[in-house]
Amino acid sequence: MSRWRAAACRFSAAAASRSSAAESRALSRACANAPLLPPLPLHTLSRTFSKSAAATATSTATSRGPGAAAPASAGPRPEVRLNSMFLSKPCSLALPPDSPLRAADPQYEGIKRFMLTLLLFYSKQSKALRGANIVYDRITSQVDAPAIYDVFQLEKTFKTTFSLLVLHMWLVLRRLKEEGKDGVKFGQYIYEIYNHDVELRVSKAGVNLLLIKWMKELEKIFYGNIVKYDAAISPEARQDDLVNVIWRNIYAEEGSQAVDAAAAPAVQALARYTRREATCLSLTDKDAMFSGNFKFTTLLPPTPSPTPKRPTR
């Protein structure tokens, strides 16, 4: 064992022996205290929620200077009305049969299928692993899309991306629990893929020496947030419990408790989105969940394409 790996193991063992602080503040503390973090975008966030997306677009246009033309690729941005978003009736998230986004298991014939059968390609576990990878791709497609940060007024940092990733993992795992033992086992496959992806994200962000310590810290946050989301959406929970949990887990800085008045519309919209997605996933059939043939709700309407100009005669 190398000197650095041994030091990391001793550090992680010492961290495990200490009593953990509140889960909602653990990530911020780790981001502030861990060494080798200059490459990481994990600085303390100064959030000015009173600035809307329109104001941000205006400031961007101002920074280009007067008279400067907008980029050719920039189209009209859809209007975001947070107070009226995610109030529609929930429906199944399963993809229609003719959707180009559907994933189908490859079907081979003849000797090729015979050989793949011998190699257990068509075994129940192999099919489950392929489905788990597709499901996790659906999660990361939603979390990594710029739209989710634009709509909910979030800065795209490691902290916010990880928090949204945990939220969508909880939505999927909560739905899979409804399928009993099969769903729990399938959820374990997804969790293992998630762990590997988070480790890659942390390494890509610049943490190499204290990776074990980071992963343990993030694991505590994951399970702590899962418990809080379950409690906030239970029948015994109060109406504003989910709003408060989302504020503490995703938006709030360390030490911040009450929901910021300027941030309230975005936090409430994310809470409505969370409730709606949980209900929509419950309406999504088992086959779609186990094959990954579902898609989270689109956050922004499609941008209208510009009308082509008629040639002048």
Image: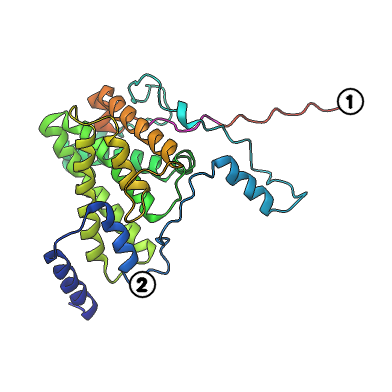
Image: magenta residue range: 296-302
**Residue located at (69% from left, 44% from top):** 72
Q: Amino acid at mark 2?
A: Leu
**Residue located at (19% from left, 72% from top):** 11
Label 2 to label 1: alpha-carbon separation: 64 Å
In the rendered image of this protein, does residue 108 appear above or below residue 160? Answer: above
Q: Name the image quarter holding the N terminus.
A: bottom left
- Please give the residue where the numbered disc 1 appears in the rendered image: 313
Q: Name the image quarter holding the C terminus.
A: top right
Q: Position of residue 247 (x, y in %)?
A: 34, 43
Near-viewer residue (167 or 286): 167
**Residue located at (23% from left, 45% from top):** 225
Q: Residue furthest bottom?
A: 3
Query: How would you classify the magenta stretch by its main secondary structure?
Result: loop
Q: Position of residue 115 (x, y in %)?
A: 21, 41
Q: Quadrant of residue 277?
A: top left
User: Can residue 136 be seen here?
Assistant: no
Near-viewer residue (31 or 289): 31
**Residue located at (46% from left, 29% from top):** 83
In the rendered image of this protein, does residue 245 appear above or below residue 155? Answer: above
Q: Nearer the viewer, mark 2 or mark 1?
A: 2
Q: Amino acid at mark 1?
A: Arg
- Please give the residue where the numbered disc 2 appears in the rendered image: 36
Q: Is residue 297 magenta?
A: yes
User: Can residue 143 be seen here?
Assistant: yes
Going by the image, does 225 lie left or right of 89? Answer: left
